Image (cartoon, rainbow, N blue to C red):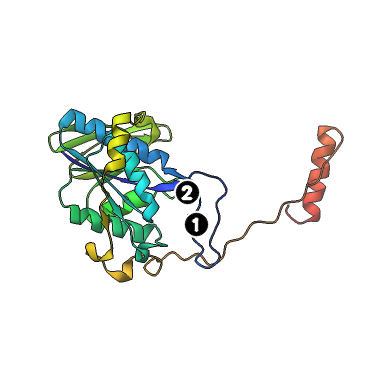
C-alpha cells in the first residue's frame, strides 16, 4: 500500500504578524511546529503501513525551514519525504496550494491513500485536502475518525454534529483526519539520529509540471485587500434595578437607537 501524507509547518505562537505589502503571514523568525492535525495523519499512515505493508511518503510545501517538519516526520518512522519549495510558490491561497500539491502527487505517481489533517491551525479553512482531491479527481471524505482497508475498498467513519457516518468507497481516495483517530507516537532516539543525517529532496517549480499562472500569490484567486486590528469596544451600558426594571430599561434603550 502506498500512502502519501501532506503536512504543513505552522507558527507555534499566537503572536502572528502580517506582511503589510503581501498581506500574508510573516514566518521568518517565528518558532514552528508540525500542524497538530497533521501529526495524526502521519500516525495513521504509519499504522496503515504496519497493518497492510507498503510505504509512507510525507510531503510539505513551504519555505526552506519547513525541512525541519519533514525531519520530525522521518523521526516518527516514515519512509520518504519531499519538500516542495520555491519562491514562486510563496503567497499561495488554498486553491493554488491544492493545485501545487496535486501536481507534486502526480509526479510521485503511485498512491492508494492520501492523508491530510482536517485543517491547519494558522488558517483553519479545511479546504486544501478536499481541494487536492478535486484536482486529482478522486473521492474524498473529511473529518475521518476511523479507517479500515480491505483490498481496494475502504470503510471509514466520519464525524458529524450528532454522531458519525459510515462511508464505503473505492481506493485511491483522500481522507482528512480529526484528532480522535489516534494518538501520535513519540519519535525514538534512533529515529531522530537517522532523520538528522537524511538528505531532504527539494522540488522546485522546474521539477513539477505546473502552470505558472496557477501557483503562488499571482495564481491565487483569493486576494486580501486589507488587514487591520479592530478598535476596542466600549464598556457598554449597565441597567440596574429589578429584573423587570432592567428589561424595561433595555427595551427603552433599544427603541431609542431604533433596533426595535
Q: Between 136 and 53, which is closer to the camera in this rendering? A: 53
Q: Is residue 166 visible?
A: no
Q: Residue 233, how many percent across, how many down?
A: 73, 51
The residue at which mark 1 appears reads as: 25
Residue at mark 1 to residue at mark 2: CA–CA distance: 9 Å
Q: In this view, does 48 lie above or below 71?
A: above
Numbered disc in front, either 1 or 2: 1
Horizontal arrangement in the rendering, residue 29 relative to residue 68 (left or right): right
Residue at 32% x, 54% y is: 131
The single residue placed furthest to the right in the displayed view is 241
Asked whether disc 1 touches disc 2, contact meaning CB atoms under 8 Å apart, the reply is yes
Q: Residue 100, how many percent across, how many down?
A: 30, 59
Q: Is residue 93 above or below residue 187?
A: below
Q: In this view, does 233 lie above or below 212?
A: above
Residue at 20% x, 33% y is: 49
Q: Between 185 and 41, which is closer to the camera in this rendering? A: 185
The residue at which mark 2 appears reads as: 122
Mark 1 and mark 2 lie on one chain; the one further toward the N terminus is 1
Residue at 22% x, 32% y is: 48
Horizontal arrangement in the rendering, residue 124 relative to residue 147 (left or right): right
Q: Is residue 139 above or below residue 63?
A: above
**Mark 2 Cα shell of 10 Å, populated few (<14), some (14-19), many (≥20):** some
SS class, disc 1? loop
Q: Between 126 and 82, which is closer to the camera in this rendering? A: 82
Q: Can residue 99 be seen in this view?
A: yes
Q: Between 89 and 202, which is closer to the camera in this rendering? A: 202
Amino acid at each position: 500500500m502506498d500512502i502519501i501524507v501532506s503536512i504543513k509547518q505552522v507558527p507555534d505562537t499566537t503572536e502572528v504578524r502580517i506582511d503589510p505589502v503581501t498581506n500574508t503571514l510573516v514566518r521568518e523568525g517565528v518558532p514552528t511546529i508540525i500542524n497538530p492535525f497533521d501529526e495524526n495523519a502521519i500516525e495513521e499512515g504509519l499504522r496503515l503501513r504496519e497493518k497492510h505493508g507498503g510505504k509512507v511518503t510525507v510531503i510539505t510545501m513551504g519555505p526552506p525551514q519547513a525541512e525541519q517538519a519533514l525531519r520530525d516526520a522521518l523521526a516518527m518512522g516514515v519512509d520518504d519525504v519531499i519538500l516542495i519549495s520555491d519562491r514562486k510558490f510563496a503567497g499561495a491561497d488554498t486553491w493554488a496550494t491544492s493545485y501545487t500539491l496535486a501536481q507534486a502527487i502526480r509526479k510521485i505517481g503511485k498512491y492508494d491513500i492520501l492523508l491530510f489533517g482536517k485543517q491547519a491551525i494558522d488558517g483553519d479553512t479545511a479546504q486544501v485536502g478536499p481541494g487536492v482531491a478535486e484536482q486529482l479527481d478522486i473521492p474524498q471524505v473529511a473529518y475521518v475518525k476511523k479507517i479500515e482497508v480491505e483490498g481496494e475498498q475502504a470503510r471509514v467513519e466520519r464525524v458529524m454534529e450528532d454522531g458519525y457516518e459510515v462511508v464505503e468507497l473505492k481506493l485511491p481516495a483522500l481522507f482528512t483526519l480529526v484528532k480522535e483517530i489516534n494518538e501520535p507516537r513519540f519519535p525514538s532516539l534512533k529515529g531522530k539520529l537517522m532523520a538528522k543525517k537524511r538528505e531532504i529532496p527539494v522540488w522546485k517549480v522546474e521539477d513539477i509540471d505546473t502552470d505558472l499562472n496557477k501557483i503562488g500569490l499571482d495564481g491565487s484567486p483569493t486576494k486580501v485587500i486589507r488587514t487591520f486590528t479592530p478598535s476596542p469596544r466600549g464598556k457598554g451600558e449597565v441597567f440596574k434595578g429589578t429584573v423587570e426594571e432592567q428589561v424595561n430599561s433595555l427595551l427603552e434603550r433599544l427603541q431609542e437607537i431604533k433596533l426595535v
